[in-house]
C-alpha cells in the first residue's frame, strides 16, 4: 500500500530514526552514518538535503537563535514538495545510539508555525529539550516562513501543507 503525501514527511523522520536503532529485533545491520543520509529520497517528493554531525554542544541556527547544552546528534535537513506550490522544510535530530531512548517524538511548532520549534528556553516540546531527553525528534516550518496567514492567500496548496501535509501522520 502506498503512503499518502500527507504522511511522507514524518514517516521519513521515523525511518531515519530507525536507521540508527541497534535495539531492533532484526538481522544485524550497520547503522547509517550521518553524512550518508544526504540525498535520500522518500515518497511524496521528499528528500534529505543535508546531514551534519553536531558535536560542539552548541548550534547556531540564526543570528537570533542559538541552542546550547546539546548532546552529540545528527542534524538532518530536508524538504518535501507534494505539489508545485509546496516547499515544506523540516529537520530531524537524531541522538547518538548511546543516548537514544529508542523513541521518536515530534516537536510542536505552535500557532501558524513558520519555523521548527528549535528551542523554547527549556520548555517541553521543543527540539532541544526532546533531544536532551534522548528522543529522536523533528520539526517543520509547515510549508511557509511567515508567522501570520498572509502566505495562504491565493495559495490553496500551501494551506493544505499547513493544515495536513506538513505534520499529520
Image (tube, helix red, strand yellow):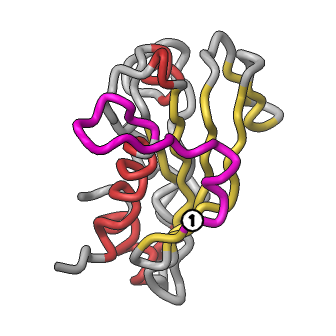
Q: Vertical placement of 125 versus 122: above or below?
A: below
Q: Position of residue 117 (x, y in %)?
A: 51, 36
Q: Is residue 27 magenta?
A: yes
Q: Which residue is mark 1?
A: 40
Q: Position of residue 83 (x, y in %)?
A: 46, 86
Q: Position of residue 53 (x, y in %)?
A: 70, 34
Q: Is residue 114 visible?
A: yes
Q: Position of residue 122 (x, y in %)?
A: 50, 12
**Magenta stretch prevailing secondary structure:** loop
Most extreme residue toward the bottom, as rendered?
84
Residue name at image x 78 percent, y 37 percent: 62
Q: Locate residue 133: give its quadrant.
A: top left
Residue name at image x 66 percent, y 53 percent: 36
Q: Secondary structure at mark 1?
A: loop
Most extreme residue toward the left, as rendered?
1
The N terminus sits in image quarter: bottom left
The C terminus sits in image quarter: bottom left
Residue stretch in magenta: 20-40
Quick check: 95 left or right of 58?
left
Q: Is residue 7 magenta?
A: no
Q: Nearer the viewer, residue 154 or 99?
A: 99
Q: Locate residue 37: give its quadrant.
A: bottom right
Q: Is residue 110 visible?
A: no
Q: Nearer the viewer, residue 7 or 142?
A: 7
Q: Vertical placement of 59 versus 43: above or below?
A: above
Q: Nearer the viewer, residue 19 or 67?
A: 19
Amino acid at each position: 500500500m502506498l503512503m499518502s503525501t500527507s504522511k511522507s514527511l514524518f514517516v521519513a523522520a521515523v525511518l531515519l530514526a530507525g536507521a540508527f536503532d541497534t535495539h531492533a529485533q532484526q538481522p544485524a545491520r550497520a547503522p547509517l552514518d550521518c553524512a550518508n543520509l544526504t540525498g535520500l529520497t522518500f515518497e511524496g517528493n521528499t528528500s534529505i538535503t543535508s546531514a551534519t554531525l553536531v558535536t560542539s554542544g552548541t548550534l547556531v541556527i540564526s543570528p537570533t537563535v542559538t541552542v546550547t547544552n546539546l548532546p552529540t546528534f545528527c542534524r538532518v535537513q530536508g524538504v518535501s514538495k507534494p505539489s508545485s506550490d509546496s516547499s515544506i522544510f523540516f529537520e530531524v535530530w537524531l541522538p547518538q545510539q548511546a543516548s537514544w531512548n529508542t523513541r521518536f517524538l515530534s516537536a510542536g511548532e505552535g500557532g501558524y508555525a513558520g519555523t521548527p520549534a528549535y528551542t523554547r528556553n527549556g520548555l517541553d516540546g521543543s527540539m532541544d529539550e526532546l533531544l536532551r531527553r534522548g528522543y529522536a525528534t523533528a520539526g517543520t516550518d509547515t510549508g511557509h516562513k511567515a508567522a501570520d496567514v498572509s502566505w495562504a492567500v491565493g495559495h490553496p496548496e500551501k494551506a493544505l501543507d499547513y493544515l495536513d501535509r506538513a505534520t499529520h501522520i
